[in-house]
């Protein structure tokens, strides 16, 4: 571009000083700034090349070697797929990925089985489903009569749990399905027959109402609500207060757990760790809490 006699005011891209240029393409105020900018550019290019070479040696090269292997262990297969070791075990337990267990410490995966798993689960676009209209509904009065709750509780739970509702002619109608599901989830255990009311606890144990609520919360005492009244399990309160001895927990042996849930030894250990099931070790044998293992592995009752 031919220079003109018109001076153009610009800012140097290197030092930030203002200067007058004769061409609009001029970027630097002097040769020194131009040289330093060029050196910085070459230095960055050199560092980028070195970083790329480092990644090739430390990341891509090991992956190329794994791609060439026919038989892989769990760590190698997880590295190849970019997963954690636990995530790979979940794929194996779910049956999506085939694996061969040669010993208690050696699991082998064939490279072809990984390709077969990927080919069997191609990506499909998730179709947007239209929201289904709420057809079965409760009025506020119906919920109050059926479940013995107060009106303020209905609105409070409805807001917190996002229960679908309809406004019509100045009245509020609640989704029957969602209300029933929430009540069933929070329903008190039917095996508990004896209950303390809050005033009874205050009188028997000389506690304030705040102390009662804190005590029940810290000891996770089962409770039920009847309109505005709250009741706590008599058995659990007496155990927490030391008035009666707690029941001894029952345990499954490994053989019993494997037979009941139709699982392998590794699967029982895996799920007991995932769901934090209480374990008891007697000599070289390990037992699992019956109650906690049943809650973790048995399907929910409808």
Image (cartoon, rainbow, N blue to C red):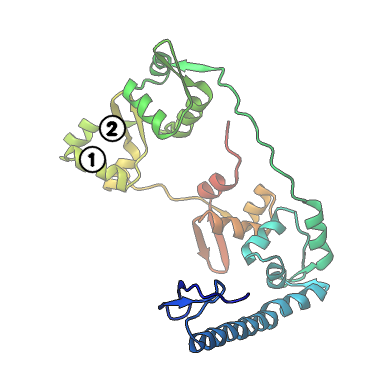
* Residue with the mark numbered 2: 196
In this view of the protein, which residue sits in the foreground, 55 or 47? 47
How many other residues sit within 10 Å of disc 1, few (<14), some (14-19) or many (≥20)? some
For residue 62, what is the image quadrant?
A: bottom right
Q: Mark 1 — residue? A: 212
Residue at left offset 69%, top offset 83%? 57
For the image, the number of numbered tags is 2
Residue at 20%, 31% in the rendered image: 199
As helix, strand or loop, the secondary structure at mark 2 comes to strand
Q: Can I make out residue 123 in this image?
A: yes
Q: Which residue lies at the image location 70% right of the left edge and 53% below the top edge?
A: 94
- Farthest residue in the front direction? 5
- Can the viewer see residue 12 in this picture? no
Instruction: Indicate the quadrant where residue 115 lies.
Output: bottom right
Relative image position of residue 150 (x, y in whole percent): 33, 21
Q: Is residue 221 left or right of residue 182?
A: left
Q: Earlier in the sequence, mark 1 or mark 2?
A: 2
The quadrant of the image that shows the N terminus is bottom right
Q: Nearer the viewer, residue 134 or 188?
A: 134
């Amino acid at each position: 571009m031919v220079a003109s006699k018109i001076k153009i005011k610009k800012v140097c891209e290197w030092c930030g000083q203002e200067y007058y240029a004769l061409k609009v393409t001029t970027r630097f105020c002097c040769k020194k700034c131009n040289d330093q900018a060029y050196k910085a550019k070459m230095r960055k290019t050199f560092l980028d090349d070195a970083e790329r070479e480092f990644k090739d040696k430390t990341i891509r090269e090991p992956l190329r070697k794994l791609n060439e292997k026919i038989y892989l262990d769990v760590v190698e297969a997880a590295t190849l797929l970019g997963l954690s070791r636990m995530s790979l075990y979940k794929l194996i337990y779910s049956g999506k990925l085939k694996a061969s267990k040669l010993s208690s410490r050696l699991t082998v995966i064939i490279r072809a089985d990984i390709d077969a798993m990927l080919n069997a689960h191609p990506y499909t676009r998730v179709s947007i489903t239209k929201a289904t209209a709420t057809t079965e509904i409760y009025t506020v009065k119906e919920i109050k009569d059926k479940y013995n709750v107060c009106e303020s509780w209905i609105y409070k739970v409805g807001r917190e749990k996002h229960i679908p509702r309809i406004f019509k002619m100045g009245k509020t109608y609640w989704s029957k399905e969602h209300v029933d599901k929430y009540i069933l989830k929070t329903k008190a255990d039917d095996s508990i027959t004896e209950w303390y009311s809050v005033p009874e606890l205050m009188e028997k144990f000389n506690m304030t109402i705040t102390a009662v609520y804190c005590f029940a919360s810290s000891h996770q005492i089962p409770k039920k609500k009847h309109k505005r009244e709250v009741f706590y399990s008599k058995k659990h309160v007496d155990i927490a207060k030391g008035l009666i001895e707690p029941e001894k927990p029952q345990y499954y042996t490994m053989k019993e757990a494997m037979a009941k849930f139709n699982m392998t030894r590794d699967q029982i250990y895996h799920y007991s760790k995932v769901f934090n099931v209480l374990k008891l070790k007697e000599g070289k044998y390990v037992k699992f809490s019956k109650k906690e293992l049943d809650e973790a592995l048995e399907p929910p009752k409808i």
